[in-house]
Image (cartoon, grey):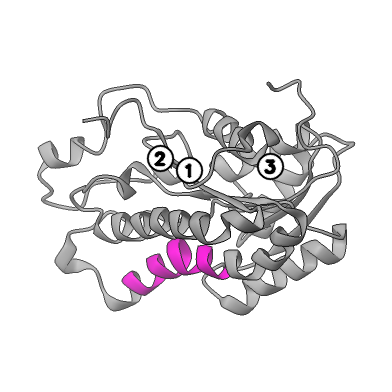
Amino acid sequence: MTGARRFEDKVALITGAGSGIGRATALRLATEGDSVYLADINADALAETAALLPSSAPREAGVADVAKSDQCQRLVEDCVKAFGKLDVLCNIAGIAPCQHFVDISDEQWDRVVGINLSGVFYLCRAAMPHLVASRGNIVNMSSSAGRTGQAYNTAYCATKAGVLMLSKALAVEFAASGVRVNAVCPGGVTTPLTQAFRPPEQADMNLFMRLNPLLPMAAPEEIAGAVAYLASDEARFVTGADFAIDGGQTAG
């Protein structure tokens, strides 16, 4: 469907847009006619993404730390100020440390929770009144780690499971308001996040390899395709979905 124009006259706010799945999603939605507001903590990466968009695609960008409630509120306000409305929120920003459970510090725990879960909550809360007005939708990025336990991935698993349940709860609460909320659950994807993923010292490699099935990883563009489907009117009857794209990793 890359030749389709499913998002004509639509506006999307995309976090994590500086790289990986966030960048691929921004490119996909912009190619299909969306006006996009790009958000990331990395200003240089945002500029690189913006430069890759089709020249005809309306775009704005904002640098923000999604772990900060006030910065999430500002992103939504700036997006609506720039484009007049908000139709789609894509919460894609995230981090994935790999550590022995007992080595996770309070600061590291708080940072993972802040970016992966609190940021999703803050943005959904700020965006919801605008999405009710536009009868829009939210696509949150969960993970296979939100569907099954993974060694050395405690904080990531906990936060991604939280994103999944947050998405389902919002889907139920706001169905009557016409707002759909879905979660995508990728397995391994070839992004800077996974390329930096390493087992901790003295890890049990049999356990670690369960995180990385011996299958080719997905490309970011494949995940972006699922996001585009869920965000489009083609998925008008899809809400509360737990959309796994993991090569069968969590099928059993």
Of marks 2 and 3, which one's residue comes earlier in the chain? 3
Real-space CA distance between mark 1 and mark 2, rounded to the nearest whole angstrom: 5 Å
Contact (Cβ within 8 Å) of mark 2 with mark 3: no
Q: Which mark is residue 195?
A: 2
**Residue in the picture at 61% in, 56% down:** 176
The quadrant of the picture occupied by the C terminus is top left
Measured from the top left, where is residue 190 in percent x and y? 45, 33
Task: Tell me which corner region of the image, top left, top right, bottom left or bottom right, holds residue 123.
Answer: bottom right
Contact (Cβ within 8 Å) of mark 3 with mark 1: no
Real-space CA distance between mark 2 and mark 3, rounded to the nearest whole angstrom: 21 Å
Q: Nearer the viewer, mark 2 or mark 3?
A: 3
Question: With respect to residue 181, does 72 lie above or below?
Answer: below
Q: Which mark is residue 26?
A: 3
| Residue type for callout 2 | Gln
Question: With respect to residue 105, does 164 lie above or below?
Answer: above
Which sits in the foreground, 124 or 46? Answer: 124
Task: Tell me which corner region of the image, top left, top right, bottom left or bottom right, holds residue 148.
Answer: top left
**Residue in the picture at 71% in, 45% down:** 48
Give left or right: position of 202 versus 10: left
112 drawn magenta:
yes
| Residue type for callout 1 | Pro
Magenta extent:
109-122
Count neighbours of disc 2 (C-alpha within 10 A) and say few if under 14, some if 14 to 19, many if 20 or more. few
Contact (Cβ within 8 Å) of mark 1 with mark 2: yes
Measured from the top left, where is residue 40 in percent x and y? 63, 58
Question: Which residue, given by chain and number where applicable, does mark 1 sit on?
Answer: 192
Q: Which mark is residue 36?
A: none
| SS at badge 1 | helix
Count neighbours of disc 1 (C-alpha within 10 A) and say few if under 14, some if 14 to 19, many if 20 or more. few
| Residue type for callout 3 | Ala
